[in-house]
Image: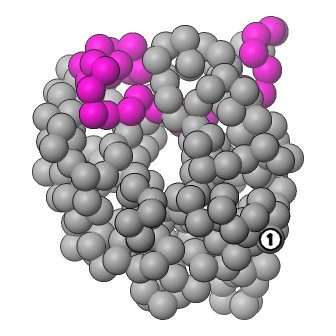
Amino acid sequence: MTDARRPLVAGNWKMNGLTADGVALAKGVAAHAADAAAEVAVCPPFTLIGAIGGAIGSGAVVLGAQDCHTASSGAHTGDVSAAMLADAGCGMVIVGHSERRTDHGEDDALVRAKAEAVQAHGMTAIVCIGETEAERDGGQTLDVVTGQLAGSLPDGSDAANTVVAYEPVWAIGTGRTPTNDEVQEVHAAIRQALAGRFGDDVADAMRILYGGSMKPGNAAELVALADVDGGLIGGASLKTEDFAAIIDACG
């Protein structure tokens, strides 16, 4: 992390939370984020977006979502569009999370189209990329990650409308993390690829989050790495105390 990029801590609640607990969690996060140096976002499930938006108000926490459809409207039963999310007050949307890529067969082209939809409606796309354990063991990490980056980011991406989240698939929710040197190597390769495509100015300004089991005990050392600009937090974002500790570590 450098002073040129404000760190971002984004909580991905995944398929967790009912109204009462979600509102209580959001209020706790909002109270802590009021004095935070880092930017803070929460991405609840679709059913809670309205309630969480009301709980956090227009203060220090950005309301986000976990996915969207590529179209603004239409005959897409069960889907939610970027236009609807923007209308509901969202400022960020996660696209391409490994669980979407694995569980729903989403490829880079679809992730790119979703990111384009997010950007077109004035929101920031948090674009997720990352390798499996087999790919890492096979020495393919950098090729896989930079390939996904190339395929998943729209041409108009910049620091205002895009955040990249590197999430080694084998580390999500497992408690395992790569070494600090391995994390920095991948983040540096991502930034180099961004520079090659978008130029140094965009690459230097765009935030790259780490998203594989960041928790209170390792957040400070991860965010101290030169090219780690915060975290996309899963399980730890569901506990106010843990999420607050990560916010503090990233500030």
Vertical comparison of 69 with 199: above or below: above
Mark 1 residue element: helix
Residue at horizontal 59 percent and vertical 66 percent from the top: 204
Q: Residue 105 or 240: which is nearer the viewer?
A: 240
Q: Position of residue 20 (x, y in %)?
A: 20, 20
Residue at horizontal 77 percent and vertical 60 percent from the top: 198
Vertical comparison of 169 with 28: above or below: below
Q: Which residue is mark 1?
A: 196
Vertical comparison of 58 with 175: above or below: above
Q: Position of residue 133 (x, y in %)?
A: 62, 78
Q: Position of residue 35 (x, y in %)?
A: 16, 44
Q: Residue 20 or 27: which is nearer the viewer?
A: 27
**239 part of magenta stretch:** no
Magenta residues, start to end? 47-75
Q: Residue 171 or 147: which is nearer the viewer?
A: 147
- Note whether residue 119 is visible: yes
Residue 59 found in image quarter:
top left
Residue 60 found in image quarter:
top left
Side of 19 relative to 92 (left or right): left
Residue at horizontal 69 percent and vertical 53 percent from the top: 102
Query: Which amino acid, by three-letter code, is at mark 1?
Result: Gly
Residue 231 found in image quarter:
bottom left
Q: Position of residue 79 (x, y in %)?
A: 67, 20
Count of numbered marks: 1
**52 part of magenta stretch:** yes
